[in-house]
Image: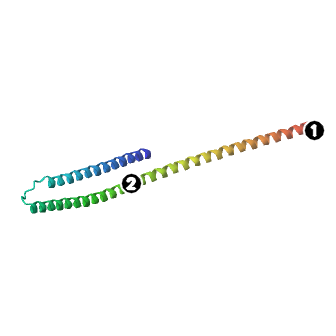
Amino acid sequence: MATNETTTSYIELSNQGSKLYVEATAAAQKHFLDYLRNISEVIARPYSPATFDGGLRESFDRAGQIHSITVTAVQTTSQKNAEFAEKAAAHVSKVQDSVFHSARGLWNTGLSNLNYVKDTTNAQLDTFSKRVDEIQTRAAAAATAAGTASKN
């Protein structure tokens, strides 16, 4: 049953990791599309001034707006990346804990199996040693009996 729970844990962790990645990717794509939309709205506006100075001022205003939009986008992206990094680190920590517990379980099972093999081998060696002692005792008794019989 512990194996089933561990397997379920691996599946859940895998699903959580995939969900985390998909959500971060979707949010990044949405943010990028919003950024492009905002930039295109600024660029696509028609120029209204009729004079050269008015056109120049409007161009600088637009450049300032684009700069402001870009700075905001970079700040937001940095913040979202930091949040994603924290979530990813927490998820990796969960995965590491799960792997550690699994490895410890495998290690304990391996040691248990080795102890069982050692105990079984010791029991078989003890049984074999007793049989050899019995055979030697019988052989010595038979040799003594044969030596006594030949003297008579």
Which residue type carries mark 1?
A: Lys
State which tag comes first along the sequence, 1 or 2. 2
Q: Is residue 37 above or below residue 152?
A: below
The alpha-carbon separation of the residues under discs 1 and 2 comes to 87 Å
Residue on which the image places disc 2 = 92
**Quadrant housing residue 149:** top right
Q: Residue at x 34, y 49 (%)?
A: 17
**Quadrant housing residue 120:** top right
**Quadrant housing residue 71:** bottom left
Residue 45 locus on image (x, y percent): 11, 54
Which residue type carries mark 2?
A: Val
Front: mark 1 or 2: 2
Residue on which the image places disc 1 = 151
Residue 117 locus on image (x, y percent): 60, 45
Q: Quadrant of the N terminus?
A: top left
Q: Residue at x 37, y 45 (%)?
A: 11
Query: Which of the two residues, 90 or 111, is positioned nearer the viewer here?
Result: 90
